[in-house]
Amino acid sequence: MWTHTKIGLAILLAASIYQYRVAAQDAHNENCAPDPELIAVPPCAIQHIGGQTRIIQSHLTTRSFNKYGLAPAWIEGGWTYVNRRGLVVVENVAIMDNWANEFHHGLVRVTHNDKWGLADTHGKQVVPLQYDGALDYEPGIGWLVCKGCVDTPINGEYSWYKGGQWFRLNAQGKLIGPTKSPPIANPPQPPPT
């Protein structure tokens, strides 16, 4: 039979082992010098402990943290946001202009398996991954999302959503209602011939 003392000792032992592993991994990665010119976090600076992913402390010094205490980090092939302790808080962050999408009113676009939603600054999905497309937040409009739309290449690296049914979400991610398909704001121009 477990007593409170035995349970307390087991918890203390588990915490000590965890701290030892973190310290050992930090020591193992000491030769992994941060390079502010690299976008991607190198594998030597990434730890996976207890189901969580984190960046070692020395690699946080090159990060710019936003007003929510989060910094974008390209980890293992995708954008994330990490906190000041280096823990990944938001995964599957959408790309905007070759960078991590920024937060608007405490929400950011996330995408996984061709579905889109919105996550908050704690990583909670406020809008589940249920849409086939999502445009970045625009003041006075909100978030525009679509179901049944198709991401179609336009010219080179650009693409736009065609078809489907469009909806408008407010700044907090709440459904306002259906809306018209948005026009291309700045359609890319074909290269000169």
Image (tube, helix red, strand yellow):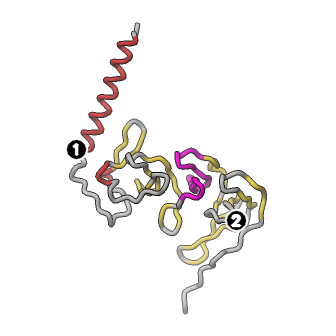
Label 2 element class:
loop
- Which portion, as a residue range, is magenta? 103-125
- Give the image location of residue 31, x and y in percent: 21, 52
Q: Residues within 10 Å of mark 1 (few under 14, many from 20)?
A: few
Q: Is residue 5 above or below residue 85?
A: above
Q: Is residue 25 above or below residue 100?
A: above
Quadrant of residue 192 within the rendered picture? bottom right
Residue type, label 2: Gly
Q: Quadrant of the C terminus?
A: bottom right
Residue carrying label 2:
140
Residue carrying label 1:
27
CA separation, marks 1 and 2? 50 Å
> Residue 73 colored magenta?
no
- Give the image location of residue 27, x and y in percent: 22, 44
> Residue at position x 68%, y 59% from top?
145
Residue found farthest to the top: 1
> Residue at position x 32%, y 48% from top?
56
Quadrant of residue 178 within the rendered picture? bottom right
> Residue at position x 57%, y 49% from top?
120
Q: Is residue 2 above or below residue 92?
A: above
Q: Quadrant of the N terminus?
A: top left
Residue type, label 1: Ala
Q: Nearer the viewer, mark 1 or mark 2?
A: 2
Residue found farthest to the bottom: 193
Q: Is residue 54 above or below residue 35?
A: above
- Give the image location of residue 111, x and y in percent: 57, 55
The mark nearer the N terminus, 1 or 2, is 1
Label 1 element class:
helix
Q: Residues within 10 Å of mark 2 (few under 14, many from 20)?
A: few
